[in-house]
Image: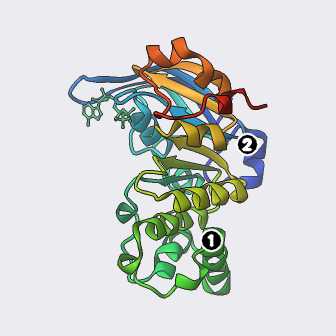
């Protein structure tokens, strides 16, 4: 499949899967192998969990999606556009990554400035920019906080603003790295509601298996740098042999009856 040039209108990207990874391999500069022969496709509108034990290669894979790392072997395409030098500005608009620590993404004097930063860099101005910011803040339930300095917000609020900065770019795919870490149960529930309502193709990297079960019909299990399983989240989490083999455990006290629900 040939890649679209970066200036191609987004509407022309609609016929492609949101994410295609073919034969991706990567060694860190110290020679450490992190990914090998990774193949996966995520279709538009899917919500998929990326599971795997510590050191499986999840972060390394995510860093390939927006070109922070570049494939040693294989290809990554976002809505048909190959991730490589020359495409990175458009790739970084198409792939919105919400990192674990919101403070990595918030650096402007106000919440509104932070949310406006990306779209303004892509040329949006005036009322169109203000509207984009308002919509993104509304999507994450932070509309009343636009003029506040991000460092005055709680951790959970900062994570929502970090999500708004990404949503304001109208990404083709939203990637969240451990979105429930440090969230209280109410914030965890509110974030789930937001993720369901935004209707963007979403990849959730998580060790929080009940959250994956609740939010993601499909899961990918990465282990030792390869895709060890790809299927329904319920089926994967019900497979005790698979779970043991890849050091995945449901939390103590988790009711296995949840796995039997239709
Ligand atoms: N900068 C680096 N230099 C060398 N090796 C690295 C580097 N970063 C990660 N690795 C190695 O690459 C492998 C994959 O790491 P990665 O961080 O992608 O795993 P992960 O699945 O995200 O783990 P976790 O769940 O612990 O966050 C690991 O063996 C790790 O030690």
Identify the residue under disc 1. Answer: 136
Q: Is residue 3 left or right of residue 103?
A: right
* Residue 80 visible from this viewpoint: no
* Between 215 and 95, the one nearer to me in the picture: 215
Residue shown at the point (53%, 29%) measured from the top left: 75
Q: Quadrant of the N terminus?
A: top right
| Residue pictured at 46% horizontal, 28% vertical | 52
Question: For this view, does 140 lie left or right of residue 113?
Answer: right
Vertical side of 63 occupied by 247: above or below: above
Per the model, the C-alpha gap separating discs 2 and 1 is 20 Å
- Labels 2 & 1 near each other (Cβ < 8 A): no
Determine which of the numbered discs, if any, sits on residue 15 in the image: none
Along the viewing direction, whichever of 218 and 31 lies nearer the viewer: 218
Q: Quadrant of ligand 1?
A: top left
Label 2 CA crowd tier, 10 Å (few <14, some 14–19, many 20+): some
Which residue lies under the disc numbered 2?
A: 44
Q: Quadrant of the C terminus?
A: top right
């Amino acid at each position: 499949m040939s890649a679209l040039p970066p200036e191609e209108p987004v509407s022309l990207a609609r016929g492609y899967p949101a994410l295609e990874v073919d034969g991706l391999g990567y060694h860190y500069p110290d020679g450490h192998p992190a990914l090998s022969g990774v193949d996966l496709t995520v279709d538009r509108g899917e919500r998929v969990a990326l599971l795997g034990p510590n050191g499986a290669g999840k972060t390394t894979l995510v860093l390939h999606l927006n070109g922070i790392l570049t494939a040693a072997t294989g290809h990554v395409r976002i809505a048909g556009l190959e991730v490589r030098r020359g495409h990175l500005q458009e790739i970084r608009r198409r792939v919105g990554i919400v990192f674990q620590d919101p403070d990595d993404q918030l650096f402007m004097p106000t919440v509104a400035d932070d949310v406006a930063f990306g779209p303004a860099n892509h040329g949006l101005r005036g009322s169109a920019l203000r509207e984009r910011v308002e919509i993104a803040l509304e999507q994450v339930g932070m509309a009343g906080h636009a003029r506040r300095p991000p460092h005055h917000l709680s951790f959970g609020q900062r994570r929502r603003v970090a999500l708004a900065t990404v949503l304001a770019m109208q990404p083709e795919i939203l990637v969240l790295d451990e979105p429930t870490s440090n969230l209280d149960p109410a914030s965890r529930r509110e974030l789930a509601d937001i993720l369901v309502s935004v209707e963007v193709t979403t990849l959730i990297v998580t060790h929080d298996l009940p959250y994956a079960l609740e939010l993601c019909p499909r899961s990918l299990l990465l282990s030792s740098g390869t895709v060890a399983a790809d299927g329904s989240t319920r089926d994967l989490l019900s497979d005790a042999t698979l779970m043991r083999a890849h050091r995945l455990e449901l939390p103590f006290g988790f009711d296995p009856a949840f796995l039997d629900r239709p």
